[in-house]
Amino acid sequence: MITKERRHTAIIGSGIVGLAHAWAAARSGDRVTVFERSDRSRGASVRNFGMFWPIGQKAEHYPLALRSGELWREFSQASGITRRPCGSACIVDRDDEAAVLEEFASIAPQLGFSCELWTRSQAEERCPGARKGVMKAALYSPTECNLDPREAMMALPPFLSEKYGVSFRWNTAVTHVEKGKIRVASGEYEAFDQIIICSGDDFQTLFPTVFAAAPLKVCKLQMLRTVPQPGGWSLGPMLSSGLTLRHYDSFAICPSLVHVKRRIARETPELDRYGIHVMASQDRDGGIVLGDSHEYGEDIEIFDKAEIDELMLRELRRLYDFPDWTLAERWHGCYAKYAEAPIFRAQPLPDVHIATGTGGCGMTMSFGLAEAFFASQF
Ligand SMILES: Cc1cc2nc3c(=O)[nH]c(=O)nc-3n(C[C@H](O)[C@H](O)[C@H](O)COP(=O)(O)OP(=O)(O)OC[C@H]3O[C@@H](n4cnc5c(N)ncnc54)[C@H](O)[C@@H]3O)c2cc1C
């Protein structure tokens, strides 16, 4: 048994899952080295909305999401990154969606969620990005925070190095892992007491047979970003939509969600085909980050579909109204999705762990999940 004080932990992958584990390992006393095949984090974690989004999590995971939020606050205070504790508003324009919000607002507080229904006039007043006159109802939740993932993922490595002595090996792909050692692409071996593989959606390089047997899927999401909004215009709460209700696990507690799903399948099957729901956050420069779609497994192509962008914009424009819709960027990101829990964990060898599959909740859950993992080790 290796003592806690002497343990040297390798983390493979510098996405949010890897950096969350690096932070938790360092806080629990480990010496930590992070290996990243790129020159910086370039995977799902830097491509996302930057939505810290507890309201979307199942009730049993909500406390862990809130703990992650405390860690985001600690990191933002130490590093000075943008963190807008703006909350979120789910804005809906259909009666069946309003019924789901009403059900959620009556059930969810008993399960620990903070949320309240807003009238149309309250929502129009408090959400500058909501289109006037179309809303049927809105659900406000105060727990969400708007981060800027590009800024946060750049700031985390120096924070971990300076405060916790974490070492980073950029441009260093790990090509092989065995008990107690790893081989990097140059062919050299390095020894570690513990190895944690946080390789995101890369199922091919390390332990491909473990991934092939695991109930994991890769999901591709298309995203858009507007130019910075004029005059310091603020989005207010981050926005989601009626389409979002069928996407996040938390709303599955609402019996009438089935009516929303049936209506969408009947009237707008194109939205189901591409897994489209619409949301908006704001980056530190004032641009509105918009999305998203969900294509899985063999449906994923390397090329982005203009049709998806047009469908997202159709739905976004119906509900939201921004001063400037000029698009500055389009991109896609891919994550690994594990449907059964907020993270997929496996231990292919003694002291070798895999951690991935955070799906659409990696920015929300990773800090709490990583902390819980290290707490369970001692
Ligand atoms: C478009 C989009 C929007 C999203 N929005 C949100 C949101 O608003 N809120 C939220 O909570 N979640 C969101 N998510 C989900 C979240 O971004 C993911 O759950 C999370 O980023 C996954 O993190 P990760 O560290 O597993 O993967 P990644 O960020 O992809 O990191 C994996 C890293 O491992 C490295 N790597 C892989 N193999 C090796 C190897 N062999 N050697 C060395 N390095 C290796 C890769 O280069 C990569 O840097 C979104 C995701 C996407 C794609």
Image (tube, grey):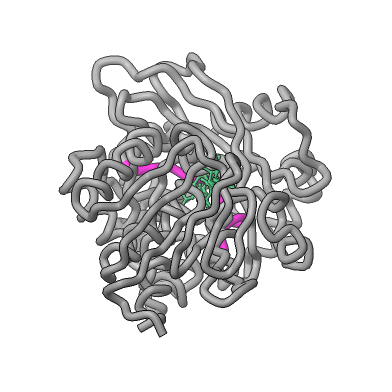
Q: Which x, y percent locates residue 237?
A: 33, 43
Where 141 falls versus 329 (above or below)? Answer: below
Q: In which quarter of the image is residue 286?
A: top left
Q: In which quarter of the image is residue 182?
A: bottom right
62 relative to 294 in the view: left or right: left
Q: Does 244 appear in magenta? A: yes
The magenta stretch is 237-250
Residue occupying the point 72% across, 61% down: 211
Q: Which x, y percent locates residue 339?
A: 65, 65
Residue occupying the point 30% across, 52% down: 166
Residue occupying the point 42% across, 67% down: 369
Q: Name the one closer to the observer, 315 or 180.
A: 180
Q: Name the one closer to the observer, 324 or 21.
A: 21
The quadrant of the image that shows the N terminus is bottom left
Question: How many marks on residues?
Answer: 0
Q: Which x, y percent locates residue 151?
A: 33, 34
Q: Name the one closer to the observer, 182 or 127.
A: 182
Where 135 falls versus 56 (above or below)? Answer: above
Q: Does 72 appear in magenta? A: no
Q: Which x, y percent locates residue 144?
A: 34, 53
5 relative to 175 in the view: left or right: left
The quadrant of the image that shows the C terminus is bottom left
Where 299 falls versus 131 (above or below)? Answer: below
Q: Quadrant of residue 8?
A: bottom left
165 relative to 326 in the view: left or right: left
Residue occupying the point 44% across, 27% down: 321
Work out whether residue 250 can be spotted.
no
The residue most toward the front is 188
Work out whether residue 335 can be spotted.
yes
